[in-house]
């Protein structure tokens, strides 16, 4: 997860190793959450069997797909601007087909074809296996739409290709959908009900990644703490499971334990957690295994009990503090990050001050902060007036960002003088003489290259820091190599 403190979201063009026998070219661009990037790898895998190699040259593409995000209005505006760019290219290459994937496709459905004339196919997050049929329809001159949400894990049998990979880190999806129904969130409507993936298929994917030389995985889900495998089906139906199914069920703590034991040399991360669902056994599993990274992304959204209730966040401010205290007690060096929304309907200055005081209590390592954006179809969009002036939203957002900057600097300073294990991921953006990688707390560390290479675990002494980056010198390989 990239550390950001504002609303800037960048799309990413994804490219895989070409197959000689494939003659068609696919340009696929992803926006939004890590799940979208993971889904794009599934799409590329499905279409590779249909004769498509990926390309990062838009002008060369036979098929252009954009994997979309609907979490905020700005994210959707970004996609529409990209479609304008595609349209300009399509005028020069009329045979090029354009498709929209993901949450925005699911939300707008057939309406997308009416609003964006360039679009030939619209495909929701659970319908990617139908892409070959949909592409055939488009090539026969018909627009194609499939936005049917599934009640089962959809892609457990698809082996994703790793796109634009550094060969070091990879995503592994473990759940799809969400049942929490936060009033501001469109995810339950665009990704469907919560369902979990067979742990055996997860272990097989993790083992395969280890054999291919990957050093780190991130277990992905809209709400990983709700992971529950009892033989298939929706989580809400677990009460109907047999006694044998219940006795052999695997929850998220159990899955963490299985994965950590299967690959003790591989780093394990996970995202995203929900405070109301995170249990002590998850924290204890993290503490038990050295290879589970000491970092939790724990969105809170607001520090006000009144606003939390209005958001349908099923925890209170005090319950959140209790969870934070348990994390600090069991894993003292654990890093914690947040999601925060300012200007939610009816938010008062007192509510806003509650958010700032919650941040002072936790002192997050970093955060993802946004002004409230009303999303059509959500409970908040239907029932609540968006009554906070934009100027007030932005002022409160800036105050949250400023406080987070202060806390981020406080947290990075805690690393000074320590020797920490870093997994080298890439060359530093600012210097071709330095490597860049993350420590277990997910903080970026930059240090001189010397004779180390991408994929090495290196012990680094931290000498300096900014609000987001640690600067150090290598002192040797870690025991994890």
Image (tube, helix red, strand yellow):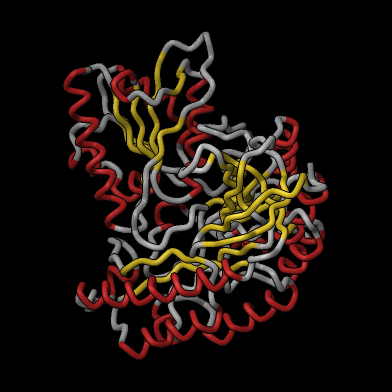
x and y percent of residue 178 in the render? Answer: 51, 59
x and y percent of residue 366 in the render? Answer: 50, 66
x and y percent of residue 355 in the render? Answer: 43, 82
Above or below, 431 against 276 in this view is above
Residue at 56 percent across and 59 percent down: it is 272
Above or below, 93 against 322 in this view is above
Above or below, 340 against 305 in this view is above
Residue at 32 percent across and 18 percent down: it is 60
Give 151 or 451, whichever is nearer the viewer: 451
Q: Please indicate whether residue 186 sits to the left or right of residue 170 in the image.
A: left
Give 378 or 435, whichever is nearer the viewer: 435
Q: Quadrant of residue 203?
A: top right
x and y percent of residue 480 in the render? Answer: 79, 46
Q: Please indicate whether residue 173 sits to the left or right of residue 328 in the image.
A: left
- Please tell me how many numbered marks the rendered image carries: 0
Q: Please indicate whether residue 357 sits to the left or right of residue 11 in the image.
A: right
Give 302 or 265, whichever is nearer the viewer: 265
**Extreme residue toward the bottom, this view:** 350
Residue at 49 percent across and 28 percent down: it is 44
Where, quadrant-wise, is the C terminus in this rendering? top right
Q: Quadrant of residue 98?
A: top left
Give 316 or 360, whichever is nearer the viewer: 360
Q: Please indicate whether residue 11 sits to the left or right of residue 74 in the image.
A: right
Residue at 42 percent across and 71 percent down: it is 340
Above or below, 105 against 383 in this view is above
């Amino acid at each position: 997860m990239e550390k950001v403190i504002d609303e800037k979201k960048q799309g990413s063009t994804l490219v895989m190793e070409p197959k000689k026998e494939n003659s068609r070219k696919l340009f696929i661009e992803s926006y939004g959450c890590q799940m979208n990037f993971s889904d794009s790898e599934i799409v590329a895998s499905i279409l590779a069997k249909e004769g498509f190699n990926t390309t990062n040259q838009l002008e060369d593409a036979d098929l252009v797909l954009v994997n979309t995000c609907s979490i905020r209005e700005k994210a959707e505006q970004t996609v529409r601007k990209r479609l304008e760019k595609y349209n300009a290219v399509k005028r020069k290459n009329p045979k090029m087909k354009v498709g929209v994937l993901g949450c925005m496709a699911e939300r707008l459905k057939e309406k997308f074809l009416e609003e964006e004339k360039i679009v030939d196919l619209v495909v929701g997050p659970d319908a990617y296996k139908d892409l070959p049929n949909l592409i055939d329809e488009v090539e026969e001159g018909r627009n194609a739409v499939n936005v049917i949400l599934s009640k089962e894990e959809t892609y457990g049998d698809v082996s994703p290709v790793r796109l634009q990979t550094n060969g070091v880190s990879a995503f592994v999806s473990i759940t799809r959908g969400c049942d929490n129904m936060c009033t501001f969130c469109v995810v339950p409507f665009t990704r469907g009900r919560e369902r979990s993936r067979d742990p055996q298929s997860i272990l097989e994917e993790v083992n395969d990644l280890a054999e291919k030389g990957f050093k780190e995985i991130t277990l992905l889900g809209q709400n990983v703490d709700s992971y529950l495998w009892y033989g298939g089906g929706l989580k809400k139906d677990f009460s109907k499971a047999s006694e044998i199914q219940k006795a052999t069920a695997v929850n998220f703590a159990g899955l963490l334990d299985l994965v950590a034991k299967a690959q003790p040399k591989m780093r394990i991360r996970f995202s995203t957690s929900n405070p109301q669902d995170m249990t002590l056994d998850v924290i204890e599993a993290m503490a038990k295994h050295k290879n589970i990274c000491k970092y939790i992304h724990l969105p809170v959204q607001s520090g006000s009990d009144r606003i939390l209730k209005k958001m349908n966040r099923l925890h209170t401010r005090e319950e959140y503090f209790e969870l934070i205290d348990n994390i600090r007690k069991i894993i003292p060096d654990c890093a914690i990050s947040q999601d925060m929304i300012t200007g939610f309907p009816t938010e008062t200055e007192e509510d806003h001050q509650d958010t700032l005081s919650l941040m002072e209590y936790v002192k997050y390592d970093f955060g993802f902060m946004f002004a409230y954006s009303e999303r059509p179809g959500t409970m908040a969009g239907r029932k609540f007036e968006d009554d906070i002036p934009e100027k007030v939203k932005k002022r409160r957002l800036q105050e949250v960002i400023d406080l987070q900057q202060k806390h981020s600097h406080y947290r990075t300073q805690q690393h000074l003088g320590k020797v920490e294990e870093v997994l080298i991921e890439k060359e530093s953006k600012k210097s071709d003489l330095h490597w860049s990688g993350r420590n277990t707390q997910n903080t970026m560390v930059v240090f001189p290259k010397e004779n180390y290479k991408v994929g090495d675990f290196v012990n680094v002494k931290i000498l300096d820091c900014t609000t987001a980056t640690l600067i150090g010198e290598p002192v040797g390989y870690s025991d994890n190599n």
